[in-house]
Amino acid sequence: MRVISYASWNRCPQFSTQAYIRQAEEVAEILNETRAPPVKRIYRTIGTLNQTQLQPTDFMDLSERRCPYIQIRSIDSCPLRYGFHRANIIPFPPNTRGFLYYHNPQNLPETCAEVRFRLTPTNDPADFVNGTDLIGHNATPWSITPLNLSFSTYASIRSHLIRAGLMKKSFANSMIKLTKKDGISRSSPHEKYYLEQPFMYDLAERALTFRTLTANEARTMMLKDLFTDRRELETPYKGRILLRFERSLFPHHGTNKVVLRVLDILDPVELNNPMYDGHVPIPVVDQLLLKRRWSQVLVRSWDLEDNTNKVAYALKILPSIIDDADLPPQDASLETPPVGGVLRKSLPSLPSPHSLPLAQLLYN
């Protein structure tokens, strides 16, 4: 085998350093001619995130922007993103005009404070009170959560909140330590900071992963097969609904069980198969989520004392912010089951595949 020395290699015209540089320059010219021009970052400088100190100059228009950058006073800039779909950035919706502000409700834990965007018709801060918060692609208010604020991407916002006295430095440090301790490198699209926090559920999906967080702990859970027909291991419905966990008020559940309530139907619930027999109960607004076990219809519930159940284990650390007296009735239209959580009046009579009342109920 012949070995080419460095000197010989350098003397070969096709391998010389000069030839390599010329070829690299030619490739660079070709790339510069065919490459699309870089997207210019949109910088917007604002003065504050304190909703009581907003000025007309803090008004911004994010309509249809994919990744606008903002700068708070002289602090470094940071990106704002509406959301992601399969690793692709979702642009902000049309008419996204208003004020970025720090939302810190007094009746919720400190972990529930977050940066939100208030939609207003004009740049007058007086319109803030009558405005509405921007809704994210997951059907809940768009926000930069405390977990997001602990990452370096949003260090400039975090620094401003601490300097302005809107966020305690000790709390910010605890969230940073939490991400390092648990190895959290990125946020989850589904984060829960209190038990009754609403979340969106896609009926076509078989599983949904959550991260539950407090100032000192993070746990992960997966809601699986809420609407899966186990006879065929398929989901019979499609659509999106809004759910929330809440404490069970059924006497036979005791004091440590939680249930799921349907808050809203975001997209019409449709059947994948018009001949479906209704074995999996349909979600109904303002009603508890049900399941079928053989011939029995049951309220879906989780025992918070069951540490072997990952859902219960993750929910256990969350505070509850709604008193029992303020919870909607859980048995207004149902008979309280005497044994085992069985409901006797939870569903209409099941349809036969030929009469199709279920399809009529969904489509009419």
Image: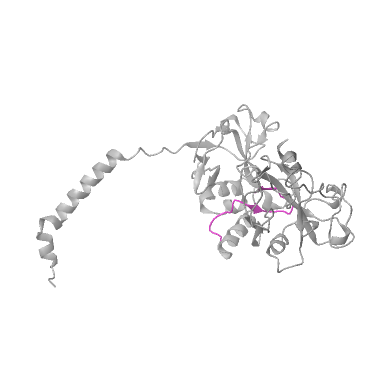
- Residue 52, placed above or below residue 172: above
Q: Position of residue 116 (x, y in %)?
A: 62, 42
Residue farthest to the front?
354
State the residue in front, 190 or 175. Answer: 190
Location of the N terminus (image quadrant): bottom left
Is 39 covered by the magenta stretch?
A: no
- Residue 245 relative to residue 232: left or right: right
* Residue 139 visible in image: yes
- Residue 105, placed above or below residue 295: above
- Residue 342 relative to residue 262: left or right: right
Residue at position x 54%, y 55% in the image: 186
* Residue 75 visible in image: no
Q: Position of residue 152 (x, y in %)?
A: 51, 53
State the residue in front, 297 or 311. Answer: 297
Location of the C terminus (image quadrant): top right
Q: Position of residue 5 (x, y in %)?
A: 13, 68
Our reading of the magenta stretch's main secondary structure is loop
The span shown in magenta is 184-201
Residue at position x 54%, y 54% in the image: 151
| Figure label count | 0
The quarter of the displayed image where residue 258 is located? bottom right
Residue farthest to the bottom?
1
- Residue 158 relative to residue 111: left or right: left
Q: How is the image coloured?
A: one colour
Q: Position of residue 262 (x, y in %)?
A: 75, 47
Residue at position x 41%, y 38% in the image: 39
